[in-house]
Amino acid sequence: MSDEDLLASLLDEERRLQFAGFDNDSAIALGTAILERARAQRLAIAIDVTRVRQLLFHAALPGTSADNDDWIRRKTNTVYRFGHSSFYIGISCKLAGIGFAERYSVDPRDFAAHGGAFPVLVKGVGLVGTVAVSGLPQADDHRLVVEEITKFLRV
């Protein structure tokens, strides 16, 4: 798949994967679903689910470290700042031929344009939260989140 096709696919995911509503119970249920999959597959990942920047779910499985939490923080900051998945932002910079920090004048200590953080979008409302994982290659982090949101929404 070309980067142009990937970028279009990432936008399509954001259009398709929108929630009717999202509350604390939703966040915990979604985080738990990701955790159960990670345990079943023995994935060394950290997981965060937020709503309006409040951390509602966090888990860190064996093999992770505080570095994974920091990657999540930086990727989540990117989603809240730009309203798109962290993977989308990274691919858009690659296509533009300019580094993320340079393009947007952001501090890489606080922002990361690597796959793994996805916006929680509520229909008719917009961005209300994030779902993020860290520990796998960026495309796999992104895919895991998207697959679990897809299952959760039954779409």
Image (cartoon, helix red, strand yellow):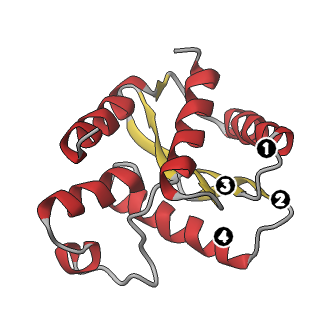
Dot 4 crowding, Cα within 10 Å, few <14, some 14–19, many 20+: many
Residue that badge 4 annotates: 68
Question: Splitting the image into 4 quarters, where does residue 126 fall?
Answer: top left
Residue lying furthest left? 96
SS of the residue under disc 4: helix
Q: Residue 35 carries which label?
A: 1
Task: Give the percent coordinates (x, y) of residue 34.
Answer: 72, 40
Real-space Cα separation, disc 3 to disc 1, in angstroms: 10 Å
Q: In this view, does 64 lie to the left or right of 132?
A: right
Real-space Cα separation, disc 1 to disc 4, in angstroms: 15 Å
Residue that badge 2 annotates: 61
Task: Residue type at mark 2: give it.
Answer: Leu
Task: Give the percent coordinates (x, y) of residue 80.
Answer: 41, 58
Task: Residue type at mark 4: give it.
Answer: Asn
Task: Residue type at mark 1: give it.
Answer: Leu
Of marks 1 and 4, which one's residue comes earlier in the chain? 1
Residue that badge 3 annotates: 48
SS of the residue under disc 2: loop
Identify the residue at horizontal 79%, vertical 44% (top origin).
Answer: 35
Residues at badges 2 and 1 in contact (C-beta under 8 Å)? yes
Residues at badges 3 and 1 in contact (C-beta under 8 Å)? no
Real-space Cα separation, disc 2 to disc 1, in angstroms: 8 Å
